[in-house]
Amino acid sequence: MKHTAVRSHRAVRWLTTRLESGLAEIRRRPDGGDISITTVIIWVASVTGALVIAGTIAAVIAKYNGSLSGI
């Protein structure tokens, strides 16, 4: 029973230390890790464009599959 209490206390101390260091880092650099809305828009547009292009290629291949088999 005592061993479990020691391990629990050690885990709580570790979590507290990690939380305090994380909060200190946030106070030191409040803008760290922020992603601008422009970056999100660019990523969404890129992924959407790639999916549209892949879908178009798949549709063309499916449509002309019989015609392309002799090439």
Image (cartoon, rainbow, N blue to C red):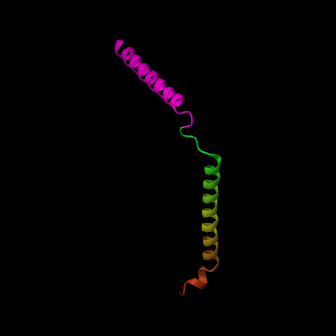
Of all residues, the one furthest to the top in this rendering is: 2
Of all residues, the one furthest to the front in this rendering is: 28
Instruction: Say left or right for 22 vs 38.
Output: left
- Residue 63 at what x, y percent from top left? 65, 77
Foreground pick, 7 / 25:
25
Foreground pick, 61 / 46:
46
**Span colored in magenta:** 2-31
Foreground pick, 63 / 56:
56
Of all residues, the one furthest to the left in this rendering is: 3
Is residue 56 a member of the stretch shown in magenta?
no
Up the image or down, 27 lies above or below 66; here it is above
Up the image or down, 21 lies above or below 56; here it is above
Up the image or down, 56 lies above or below 19; here it is below
- Residue 39 at what x, y percent from top left? 61, 50
Is residue 14 a member of the stretch shown in magenta?
yes
Residue at 60% across / 82% down in the picture? 66
Foreground pick, 67 / 38:
38
Instruction: Say left or right for 13 vs 66.
Output: left
Q: How many marks?
A: 0
- Residue 13 at what x, y percent from top left? 42, 19
Residue at 60% across / 63% down in the picture? 50
- Residue 52 at what x, y percent from top left? 64, 65
Instruction: Say left or right for 30 vs 5.
Output: right
Image quadrant holding the N terminus, namely top left
Residue at 35% across / 12% down in the picture? 2
Up the image or down, 69 lies above or below 32; here it is below
Q: Main secondary structure of the magenta part?
A: helix
